C-alpha cells in the first residue's frame, strides 16, 4: 500500500514538473515575426535601394544639352537710334557668319563676292554707304574687327558687335573723303581699313591707313607693290601678284595715279598666276 501511494505521488510530481517546463518554454522562446513585419522590412530595404539609385542617378545621368555648342558668345546689334539687341549663342562655328545664322531672331543680308559678304541690312535696317552715308561696322570685344563675317574667327567668350555707323561720325576728323581699303591675303582673309582723307591718289590714303604696311619697287611710273602687311607677292619669285580693284572692278592705275573718291572701296588682293 505504501509503494502504490509513493508511485502516485511520484507521477503527480512529474506531471507538475513537465507543466512548469512547458510554461517556462512558452514564455522564453523567440517569437516569429509576422508577415506584415517581413513585408515592412523588405519594403524599407527596397525604398533605401530606390533612394540610393535616385540620388546617384541624379548625378551620374546628368548630361549637357546635346544642342549646345562648345563656344558661348554674344552678338550685339546697335541700330541707328542707339538701341542694342543682344543674342547669346552657343555654337561650334569657326567663323562669325555661321554664328550669326544660328542667332535666333537676327537677320541680315548684303552683297556677295568671292571674298565673302558685305553686310548691308541687319534686322531690316539698311546701311549702304553710297545710299545712306552709313555702314555696318564690326567690333570684337570693343576693338574694330579686322575681318569680314566670312573670315572672322569665333572665340569662346567673345562679344561681336554689329554697329550702325554714319559718315557724320567723321565730321570732326581730318579728311573730306571717307573710303575703305581692303587687303585680302593668300589665305583668303580680308583686313578692312576705314580712312578719312584728303588724298588725291591711293598711295597717300594707304599711308594714312593705320596698321596697313606695304613695300615695292619704285620706278618712273610709281611703285610696283610687292609686299602688303608682310606678305610678298612677286610674280617672278612667287608666281603671284597684288591686284587692285575699285568698287569690285579691276583698277586701271597704279597706287600713285589711282584717284581717291569719296565713298569708294579699294581692294588689294593677293592673286596667284
Image (cartoon, rainbow, N blue to C red):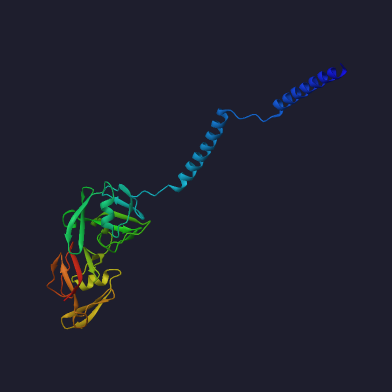
Residue 261, image x, y percentages: 16, 65
Left or right: 159 in relation to 168: right
Q: Quadrant of the N terminus?
A: top right
Q: In the displayed structure, would residue 34 be above or below residue 120?
A: above
Residue 139, image x, y percentages: 31, 58
Q: Nearer the viewer, residue 1 or 9?
A: 1
Left or right: 202 in relation to 27: left
* Residue sitting at x 15%, y 81%: 221
Residue 55, image x, y percentages: 49, 43
Left or right: 45 in relation to 15: left
Q: Quadrant of residue 152?
A: bottom left
* Residue sitting at x 56%, y 32%: 38
Residue 137 shows in this picture: no
Q: Nearer the viewer, residue 69 or 183?
A: 69
Q: In the displayed structure, would residue 268 be above or below residue 173?
A: below
* Residue sitting at x 46%, y 45%: 57
* Residue sitting at x 49%, y 39%: 50
Q: Quadrant of residue 6?
A: top right
Q: Residue furthest front?
A: 1
Amino acid at each position: 500500500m505504501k509503494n502504490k501511494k509513493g508511485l502516485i505521488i511520484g507521477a503527480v510530481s512529474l506531471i507538475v514538473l513537465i507543466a512548469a517546463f512547458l510554461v517556462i518554454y512558452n514564455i522564453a522562446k523567440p517569437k516569429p515575426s509576422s508577415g506584415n513585419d517581413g513585408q515592412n522590412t523588405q519594403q524599407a530595404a527596397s525604398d533605401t535601394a530606390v533612394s540610393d539609385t535616385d540620388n546617384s542617378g541624379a548625378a551620374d545621368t546628368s548630361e549637357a544639352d546635346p544642342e549646345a555648342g562648345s563656344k558661348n558668345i554674344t552678338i550685339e546689334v546697335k541700330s541707328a537710334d542707339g538701341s542694342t539687341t543682344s543674342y547669346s549663342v552657343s555654337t561650334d562655328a569657326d567663323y562669325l557668319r555661321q554664328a550669326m545664322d544660328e542667332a535666333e531672331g537676327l537677320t541680315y543680308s548684303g552683297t556677295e563676292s568671292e571674298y565673302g559678304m558685305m553686310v548691308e541690312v541687319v534686322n531690316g535696317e539698311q546701311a549702304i554707304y553710297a545710299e545712306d552715308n552709313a555702314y555696318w561696322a564690326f567690333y570684337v570685344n570693343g576693338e574694330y574687327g579686322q575681318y569680314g563675317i566670312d573670315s572672322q574667327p569665333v572665340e569662346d567668350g567673345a562679344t561681336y558687335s554689329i554697329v550702325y555707323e554714319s559718315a557724320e561720325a567723321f565730321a570732326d576728323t581730318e579728311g573730306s573723303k571717307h573710303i575703305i581699303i581692303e587687303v585680302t591675303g593668300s589665305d583668303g582673309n580680308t583686313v578692312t581699313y576705314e580712312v578719312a582723307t584728303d588724298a588725291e591718289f591711293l598711295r597717300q590714303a594707304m599711308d594714312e591707313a593705320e596698321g596697313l604696311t606695304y613695300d615695292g619697287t619704285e620706278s618712273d611710273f610709281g611703285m610696283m607693290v610687292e609686299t602688303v602687311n608682310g606678305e610678298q607677292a612677286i610674280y617672278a619669285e612667287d608666281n603671284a601678284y597684288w591686284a587692285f580693284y575699285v568698287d569690285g572692278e579691276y583698277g586701271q592705275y597704279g597706287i600713285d595715279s589711282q584717284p581717291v573718291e569719296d565713298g569708294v572701296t579699294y581692294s588689294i588682293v593677293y592673286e596667284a598666276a
